[in-house]
Amino acid sequence: MRVKLLLFLLAIAPFARADSQSFGGQWGGLNNADASISIGDNEAQDLLNVDITDSGFGIKKRDGYTQFKTIGTSTWGVRGGYYYTDTSGNKYIVHANNQSVFKSQNSGAYSAFITTDTAGTYYDFTDSQGYLYRATSDKDQFARYDGTTLTYYPSNPQGDQVEAMPDRLVTSGVTAYPNRVYFSGSADFTNFTTGLNDTDPFYEQFGLPGQKITAIKYALGRLFAWTGTTLSFWAGSTQFDGTIQDVTTNIGTTQPGSILYDNSIIYWQGQDKHFYSFDGNSIEKISKTISSSVNRFNGAESKSKNITTRGDFEEGSKTYTLTTTEAEGFVSFKGSPDTVDDFNDANITSSPVWFSTATSTIITPPSASLNYLVMHPETSQKLIVYTTAAIQYGAIVTVDIKNDDATSTLRPSIDLCQSTYSFTPTYSSGRIGCYTAVLSPFAGNTIVIYKDNTVLASSILSADLMPYGVWETVSFSQTRDGLLTISNSSGTLLSTTDTSYLAFGAYELSVVNAGIAAGSYSFDNIKKYDNWGIIYTANLPTGIGPIQWGQFNDSSSKTGNASIIYSLYSDSDTYTLPSHPLTYLSSQTITSGSIPTVSTGAYFVASALFARTASTETASLDSLYFSWNSGSFSRTYGTIDKNHRLMWSLAENNSTVNNATYIYDTRFSSWLKYSFALDAPVKVGDSIYYGGPSTGVVYNYPSGTNDNGSAITAYWKSKDFIGGDPFVEKDYKSYSLIAQTQTGSTLSLEYFLNGSASSTASTISLTNSLGLPLIRKNARLPNGVFGTFINFKFGNTLADSPFEVYSGKYEYAPRAWRVME
């Protein structure tokens, strides 16, 4: 009897030790931040296209979407959306695409009411009292729309963010003042002219100058303002009682479209790509449980370089023709010219060294009583007086000249000569290697420009070119691209273009006697003005990953025909010499207010080329501002569905456009994921109308059981269950599942052992032949299914097949402990 009892106990021992574990009931969302075996029993280590039922006790396949309308240009994504009611009560779904903003009145066909915005810009909208206001990331002109009339306000601040407060409209992102928020007049949303009354418009500055405000939002009775790294708020009603307070100095945003306000809580995506909430008291990182997903989000670090101080400019290099020292924080032409000789030293040989050649010539040198040089040749010879003072090409030489004899037949001239040229005088104006400006007042006021002995241009003036006894300042110049110009106090007298000579080493002053009459000319105050110069920035790092340029801006001042031309040079390393194309990969001329398109490398150098055509013209540079995003960048869009679930569309896994939507279900503090992007979403009742990331199509969600005719792959994958003891293997015996009856649908159930990528699957019919509301599935697993831990994945098998799962269970029997490596 004892032997029989012992055999019986041994036989039933494995069954007596069998155990089971259930999951489901109160379902959770995605947790891929923690090790799978350590997350909650009802959390998922992976999921896609599923929702938690409203009760929280089920997981179901999400709804699909259908196409609503097509707008605009098919090759551009939809980059802005809003729902708006005009003054007559008409409802508009508003979407922007390419250069246009479209409206669908009462769900009818779209029509454009803006068509001239910057191509591909991103939009920000707000509305108040039946008026729609729009701003763009490219700072297009401030605009208001009332459902019928579009009005532009060119004098108002041109920002990239706009927000309605109860009594004022605010805008930010103005290029010249990136840290400034502008407040309209009280109850006067289009008036931004500042004043001193309580009701007048005003502005507030957040953070340090140059620190760009990236987003604004009115919430919790305050105006919140984000930069790339901070969050603060303004509280008040006028410019006199408003105060600014910091919320955080290390969490900002580069994604203005991610900001949501629901149930008195602000939500946004931080610059680290995580999502945060602020309830007025404390900040919480709500995306901690999906850190693995966050690491795969395409995120760009917003960077900028503001070159505005003397130290900033002097980090780079410049030609000697420009100065950074005459005015603090400015780069400009030198305020005073290089004086070649004003003869105040009563000497023609010391500042600089002068030489004369030719015979039969009388030179009256300066003296204590005559501080200028007089030339009066007695015969028809050219007098040459030159200096070896260097002239860089592009110089402007000015000389004060006086006709000393009303009957003189002399021709005064100014020469620009190369460093190596023939000193042999000839009767004709000009020699080898020289440009010559000749003035002939005795012969109908003729002026001539020579290249050596060749006439390049000539003209006869109606006015007296060189009146007797009057000092006249004459300039002879060549621009950097070869424009030769003769000017006097009345302006340009003659000009032509020739690029035979571009670098000069000497000035010459000459007088030629063209007749028999004696005479003389006086020369004084010989000066050289530089009419070009270039400054280069230091070699600046752009960061890691793809680079997307933001808007480039300058602050400069120019008079007359003066100009400043900017260029960018990009390369993979720090050795960039703009004068040598082999040292950089790409370059581009850029203009203020534009977004560069030059291909980017890890470093860039910028240049500013100064030019002018007259000595009286000025050009000065106060600042250069470059902005860019380092890393793959895409615009995050946020919306809130009917269940107060927060939905963010974004790009992940290096996609060039948004390709996923992450949902934070505030009811259960759970994360879900959809395989499509809700770009530029507009919530209308219980529906969301959103745009395609790369096409001009607007879709409607939720609608149908598939994605505009395409299959929806939906699944929920459990954690790795370890049973009662994580250190022993188990024989897995069976599984059970409870799901909703879905006639015609089937469900796939897979299990994975020890974290393996391979699985064993079975198909469960969700059709109940008895017409019961639930499917109860109990099934045995094959013999020999064992491991240390196991997880389960269930999902749909067909495109349109819905499913709703409530609970699952597995049964196992522990094995004896053994050594495992």
Image (tube, grey):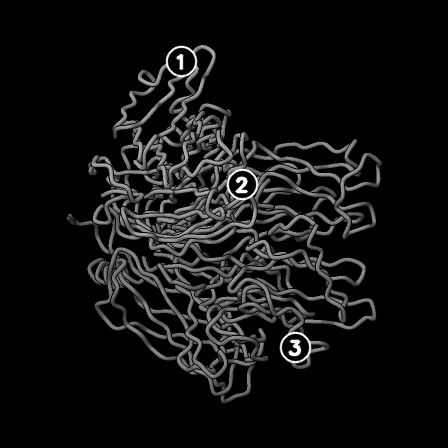
- Vertical position of residue 587 compared to residue 82: above or below: above
- The residue that mark 2 highlights is 558
Image location (x, y in percent) of residue 205: 64, 35
Q: How far is disc 1 from disc 3 in space, using C-alphas?
A: 80 Å
> Which of the two discs, 1 and 3, labels the residue nearer the N terminus?
3
Image location (x, y in percent) of residue 767: 48, 85
Q: Residue furthest bottom?
A: 769
Q: Rate crowding at label 3 as few (under 14), some (14 to 19) or many (20 or more) other CA atoms within 10 Å.
A: some
Q: For mark 3, give the secondary structure.
A: strand
Image location (x, y in percent) of residue 667: 60, 56
**Circles 1 and 3: CB distance less than 8 Å?**
no
- The residue that mark 3 highlights is 111
> Which of the two discs, 1 and 2, labels the residue nearer the N terminus?
1
Image location (x, y in percent) of residue 469: 54, 29
Dot label at residue 523: none
Q: Nearer the viewer, residue 381 or 172?
A: 381
Q: Nearer the viewer, residue 333 or 691?
A: 333
**Which amino acid type is shown beneath numbered disc 3?**
Ser
- The residue that mark 1 highlights is 346
**Which amino acid type is shown beneath numbered disc 2?**
Lys
- Vertical position of residue 179 compared to residue 8: above or below: above
